[in-house]
DNA sequence: TCTAGAATTGTTAGCGCTACCACTCGCGCT
DNA sequence: AGCGCGAGTGGTAGCGCTAACAATTCTAGA
């Protein structure tokens, strides 16, 4: 319970009255309560109040009690900007993701938050909308807050953005894409291997005319990676087979787009026997629509997804897809950041969390 | 392009050489570049550099050019903690939501971000996991950052949390629930009216044995509101009919729980002719499972949802539900915060964004 | 030519906190 | 008695920036 009531002449818990002739404790209502106010009410130095908050084990029990009493009497809330300035630590992590409203990134953020909040760090979040220029601006803006660490989705950045991240002298965790040259630490899985695995699976099932469908906007290097891996896998496993890719361009990742991709596939690549989507969202849209039209899945057309969203195992038929460790990417990134911020382990970490093929009914 | 190369003896764009005998520009690599460094390189006062950044219209074109050159030469990144401390403005908004991984809140955040980022504000995000104690701690921690505004989901808080928000002297927008006593501003819709509308709809369709199902954890007042509105509506429209509510407790909001709720309804309330869920997520799980089991929807059992997630209109059968303006809640909240922060309109705003009944095939 | 007023730039004094170091005790030891 | 030591506390000096005001230049009339 916070009280901001009259403070003059208050009596500390140990009975010592608080410097009645000292500096006036009354103030204009607009002034905020500072650490100095708490200190003079508790009859200790500002430094001691600071210690009571940041390192209570250095302060005697009796003093601690007085300070705590003074804090709750005044309703003091420490100003972290001042703390940040003086200590050169912000207890802040910046997180940059393509978009908040994609469950994969939301899950990762959730994991990140779950690890960092208990450790006393707060999360700055920004979304790039898959635009590298926008990402650079965001990084620049965030660096002004002097975060103690940085989480960023993707490994492809503008040259200036990479410089900013490298010069910041803070731990940086890039996530999702696997690369050989991370800025610092890396958590993710190989999109290439994952796509290869599912192509191998459908080829093993006897399908011979796969088509890959998704939206491949320029800034989304993950989607581009998947498309290239598909092409390579098909060339290797089905020599002579044409590599078919249906691209919805920059349209948003939703069920509607999945239906559009299905339509275009039926029109442009009618020989397709298995339609492989770059996201479970597209796959779900297409699968629901196919069933609505009376098509048999996988009889008339097999369908696969990517991501293993919860929906995948509840659809009728259930969706064959690849499971990706979204939340673990966040928690692992958080753990790595914490380790590197306290400085125990000085070495960047490269963490491949793998993926899991989920064979189900749709293919 | 950022360069941090040698700066000594650099030549400004207008040809004036930069105080070669002045304070040394070289520094240990660990020191960061400050506004003072930029100022002495540009041969202007620190204040002028500050102005060039915050209010360039007050600086002559010639000086501006020199300053910009000095900034890019040094790779200067302003320290916003210092700016915050000196100006008493943080250009930061705190957003508190129950959980990041629920698309409704993610959509609202997306809307909020879309409005605030272009205005130069950054977003602090914290999640409470539907725990009011946790919410209070989060508010306390966020207040330390002295945000210029606050967005918070829900209108029910602990007494201390309410005090903190009121004493902060910043615009606060509470969202989602409608209430008569907001702390400051309010954006949302009436859960009561929305539930009433959909109950009226199903009763109008001739259903007489509705059952309400959802998870009603203590901290989630929105779910509790819905449950109470259901009870009142049933009592009014179907006098004498028993009020049936199936509660999954604290289990997470996912398709799996929807199936569990379906099972419990079939076991505990077999007379049910329409199963009304507190979320589209539950409804989708139940609907997919019902179909998998060969039940006819709405023939054997009608189903309704809440939220109008994208999935709702793609399911087979399509899901009757209530559409709720998630993203608009975020954008409206952002707009209100901006207005109140610049101080044009001093009055708190109460904004009812309404809802829309979406009659579809499932009921 | 002179001057009020606008435009531009500089000076001073903090914002609220913490790093760093110095100081005071009380204790047990030589 | 004198000393070292650790626990507890206080004093000083900024961290990097901006508000407020002062000073300087420039401009357009009178």
Image (cartoon, coloured by chain):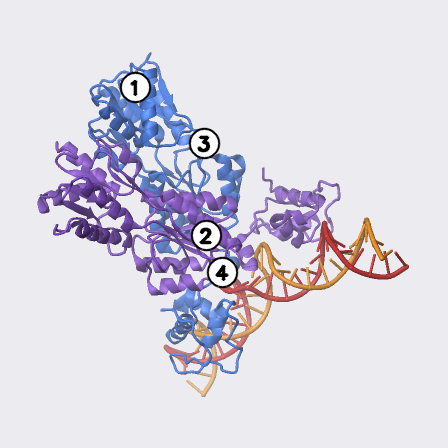
Chain colours: A purple, B blue, C orange, D red
Q: CA distance from mark 1 to mark 3?
A: 25 Å
In which quadrant of the rendered view does residue D25 lie? Answer: bottom left
Q: Is residue B281 above or below residue A161?
A: above
Chain of the residue that carries numbered disc 2 in the rendered image: A
B178 left or right, relative to A192: right
In the image, B275 versus A316, the foreground residue is A316
Are circles 4 and 1 on residues that touch, CB within 8 Å?
Answer: no
Q: CA distance from mark 3 to mark 2?
A: 27 Å
Residue B343 visible in rendering: no
Return the mark for residue B210: 1
Are circles 3 and 2 on residues that touch, CB within 8 Å?
Answer: no
Q: Is residue A247 above or below residue B40?
A: above
Q: CA distance from mark 4 to mark 2?
A: 19 Å
Chain of the residue that carries numbered disc 3 in the rendered image: B
Q: Tell me the residue at 38%/45% (across/down).
A: A108
Return the mark for residue B83: 4
Q: Which mark's residue is nearer the viewer, 2 or 1?
A: 2
Q: Nearer the N terminus, badge 4 or badge 3?
A: 4
Disc 1: CA contacts within 10 A as few (<14), some (14-19) or many (>=20)? many
Q: Which mark's residue is nearer the viewer, 4 or 1?
A: 1
Disc 3: CA contacts within 10 A as few (<14), some (14-19) or many (>=20)? many
Say which residue label 2 marks: A93
In which quadrant of the rendered view does residue A257 lie? Answer: top left
Q: CA distance from mark 4 to mark 3?
A: 37 Å
Disc 2: CA contacts within 10 A as few (<14), some (14-19) or many (>=20)? many
Chain of the residue that carries numbered disc 1 in the rendered image: B
Say which residue label 3 marks: B219
In the image, A220 versus B271, the foreground residue is A220
Disc 4: CA contacts within 10 A as few (<14), some (14-19) or many (>=20)? some
């Amino acid at each position: 319970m916070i009280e901001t009531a009259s403070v003059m002449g208050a009596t500390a818990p140990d009975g010592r009255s608080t410097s009645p002739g000292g500096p006036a404790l009354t103030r204009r209502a607009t002034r905020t309560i500072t650490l100095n106010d708490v200190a003079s009410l508790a009859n200790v130095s500002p430094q001691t109040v600071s210690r009571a908050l940041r390192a209570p084990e250095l302060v005697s029990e009796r003093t601690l009690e007085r300070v705590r009493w003074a804090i709750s009497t005044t309703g003091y809330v420490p100003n972290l900007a001042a703390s940040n300035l003086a200590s050169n630590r912000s207890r802040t992590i910046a997180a940059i993701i393509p978009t908040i409203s994609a469950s994969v990134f939301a899950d990762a953020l959730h994991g990140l938050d779950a690890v960092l909040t208990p450790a006393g760090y707060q999360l700055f979040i920004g979304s790039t909308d898959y635009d590298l220029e926008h990402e650079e601006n965001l990084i620049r803006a965030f660096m002004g807050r002097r975060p103690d660490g940085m989480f960023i989705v993707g490994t492809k950045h503008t040259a200036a953005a990479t410089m900013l991240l490298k010069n910041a002298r803070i731990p940086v965790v890039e996530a999702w894409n696997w690369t050989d040259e991370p800025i610092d630490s890396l958590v993710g899985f190989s999109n290439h291997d994952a796509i290869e695995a599912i192509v191998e699976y459908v080829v093993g099932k006897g399908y011979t005319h796969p088509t890959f469908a998704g939206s491949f906007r320029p800034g989304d290097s993950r989607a581009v990676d998947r498309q290239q891996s598909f092409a390579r896998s098909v060339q290797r496993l089905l020599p002579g087979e044409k590599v078919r890719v249906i691209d919805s361009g920059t349209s948003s990742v939703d069920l509607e787009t999945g239906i559009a991709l299905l339509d275009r596939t039926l029109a442009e690549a009618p020989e397709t026997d298995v339609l492989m989507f770059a996201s479970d969202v597209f796959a779900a849209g297409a699968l629901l629509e196919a069933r609505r039209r009376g098509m048999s899945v996988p009889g008339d057309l097999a369908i696969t997804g990517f991501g293993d969203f919860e929906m995948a195992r509840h659809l009728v038929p259930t969706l064959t897809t690849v499971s990706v460790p979204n939340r673990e990417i966040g928690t692992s990134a958080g753990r790595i950041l914490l380790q590197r911020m306290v400085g125990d382990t000085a070495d960047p970490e490269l963490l491949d969390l793998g993926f899991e093929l989920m064979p189900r009914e749709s293919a």
